[in-house]
């Protein structure tokens, strides 16, 4: 926390190639300045998956325009989302992919791709990265992951003195746990945090640790599996655990796009794809739903819980908690005096349907252009911002209704 008395958190959601949203948002907020100058505004950066790539890109000192190229450049995208080769696919995978279930990408190739695009951060420990950031705030990093064998969340920290660190908690209880830094690079932490399972990467991310007993292996999945696709709550708890008063906490939380659909029984719809349909559950549908739900917020839970901690009176909106994330949702119109859900202005129905169906691993140029379009419209207030809580009519109850509205409150404390 700096002399201004504010503790500033930057939280970056996961979302694969949708992290392009974050790069463009940072460009709009800060201009095209070196990434470390952006990081210098914050005391803590907490990130998962695609957001951790953005955080690392900033630490590598990429400008936002250069960050955007990580996602706009097809060669770079495919170096991270590298398709499994013919011999790499298990026999069963050829069967399950018929039902859109099963891995598509190589974990090993992803690690090589990350090292290639982030060469500096692939060589130094995460604990040394804060020293690269200018200014007086001593910017720290918290990257979320999921320990495959221990079945629990795993946080990679740059701050080894954090009170929330397991070894430090144990030592406070006189259990004599050695306080040694995790010998991991930023890129290794990102490798763990970006390893979405089941429908995406073929194996857990393997990281080798040097210990007093020799080399040990640990295996990780994406932090979303532990409920940290939106990692803002992890950042808030980290701050509070280290003695920061909740009234000092200021948060910029940037998402990667979220899709909201109304229930089919609220109002009529111009197209059946624009509402949640109550189809009969089936085994295959349930498997697909479970593999995708882990990559959700979980919907609004992290933002709302964090907001309630920081602003327990639950004001309609708070300058200290700015959530920025484009919403993909139908518009409520009136057709022949009847409220009707319809395609939002600026989209054709086929285009909007494709946007609703885009997954986090959107890697074709056509898909990326759709992400660019919704992001640019959001930045220009032509489409809505994600609320912290909405009602059944998809209206904002808590939070900022547009990007511009959030930007006005953000300007009160970001500099």
Image (tube, rainbow, N blue to C red):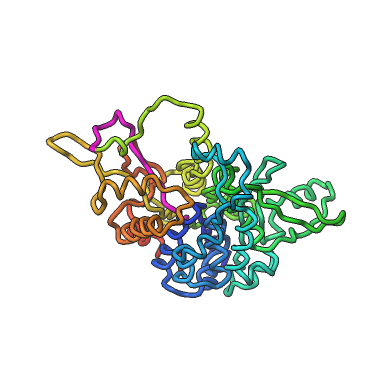
Q: Position of residue 204 (x, y in %)?
A: 66, 48
Give the position of the N terminus as an image quadrant: bottom right
Question: Which residue is most to the top?
Answer: 280
Q: Is residue 75 visible?
A: yes
Q: Position of residue 118 (x, y in %)?
A: 59, 68
Question: Which residue is most to the right?
Answer: 213
* Front position in the image: 205 or 139: 205
Q: Is residue 293 visible?
A: no
- At a point 60% along the width and 63% down the height, the residue shown is 114
Q: Where is residue 354 in the image (x, y as percent from the top left)?
A: 35, 47
- The majority secondary structure of the magenta stretch comes to loop
Count the numbered circles shown.
0
Q: Does the magenta stretch include residue 265?
A: yes
* Front position in the image: 59 or 301: 59
| Figure check: 35 above or below 176 | below
- At a point 29% along the width and 47% down the height, the residue shown is 350
Q: Where is residue 337 in the image (x, y as percent from the top left)?
A: 13, 35
> Taking 360 as reference, is 337 left or right?
left
> Taking 161 as reference, is 58 left or right?
left
Question: Which residue is most to the front?
Answer: 86
Q: Give the range drawn in magenta.
A: 253-270
> Taking 241 as reference, is 352 left or right?
left
- At a point 86% along the width and 56% down the height, the residue shown is 212
Question: Which residue is most to the left?
Answer: 336
Classify residue 27 by image quadrant.
Answer: bottom left
- At a point 44% along the width and 60% down the height, the residue shown is 20
Q: Is residue 412 magenta?
A: no
């Amino acid at each position: 926390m700096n002399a201004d008395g504010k503790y500033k958190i930057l939280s970056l959601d996961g979302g694969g190639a949708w992290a392009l949203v974050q790069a463009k948002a940072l460009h709009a907020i800060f201009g095209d300045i070196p990434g470390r100058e952006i990081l210098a505004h914050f005391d803590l950066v907490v990130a998962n998956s695609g957001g951790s790539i953005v955080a690392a890109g900033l630490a590598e000192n990429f400008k936002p325009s250069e960050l955007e190229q990580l996602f706009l450049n097809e060669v770079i995208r495919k170096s991270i989302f590298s398709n499994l080769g013919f011999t790499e696919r298990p026999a069963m995978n050829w069967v399950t992919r018929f039902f859109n279930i099963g891995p598509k990408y190589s974990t090993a190739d992803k690690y090589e791709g990350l090292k290639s695009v982030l060469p500096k951060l692939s060589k130094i420990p995460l604990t040394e990265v804060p020293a690269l950031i200018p200014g007086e705030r001593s910017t720290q990093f918290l990257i979320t992951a999921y320990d495959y064998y221990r079945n629990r969340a795993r946080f990679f920290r740059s701050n080894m003195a954090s009170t929330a660190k397991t070894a430090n908690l144990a030592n406070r209880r006189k259990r004599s746990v050695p306080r040694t830094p995790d010998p991991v690079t930023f890129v290794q932490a990102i490798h763990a945090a970006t390893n979405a399972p089941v429908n995406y990467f073929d194996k857990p991310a393997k990281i080798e640790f040097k210990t007093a007993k020799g080399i040990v292996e640990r295996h990780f999945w994406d932090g979303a599996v532990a409920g940290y696709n939106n990692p803002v709550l992890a950042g808030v708890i980290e701050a509070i655990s280290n003695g920061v008063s909740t009234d000092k906490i200021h948060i910029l939380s940037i998402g990667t796009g979220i899709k909201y659909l109304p229930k089919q029984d609220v109002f009529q719809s111009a197209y059946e794809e624009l509402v949640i349909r109550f189809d009969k559950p089936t085994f295959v549908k349930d498997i697909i739903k479970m593999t995708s739900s882990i990559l959700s917020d979980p919907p609004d839970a992290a933002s709302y819980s964090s907001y309630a901690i920081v602003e327990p009176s639950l004001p309609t909106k708070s300058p200290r908690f700015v959530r920025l994330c484009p919403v993909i949702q139908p518009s409520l119109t009136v057709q022949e005096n009847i409220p009707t859900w319809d395609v939002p202005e600026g989209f054709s129905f086929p285009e909007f349907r494709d946007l609703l169906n885009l997954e986090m691993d959107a890697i074709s140029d056509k898909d990326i252009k759709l992400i660019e379009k919704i992001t640019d419209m959001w930045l220009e207030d032509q489409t809505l911002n994600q609320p912290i809580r909405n009602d059944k009519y998809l209206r904002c109850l808590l939070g900022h209704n547009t990007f511009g509205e959030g930007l006005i409150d953000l300007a009160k404390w970001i500099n």
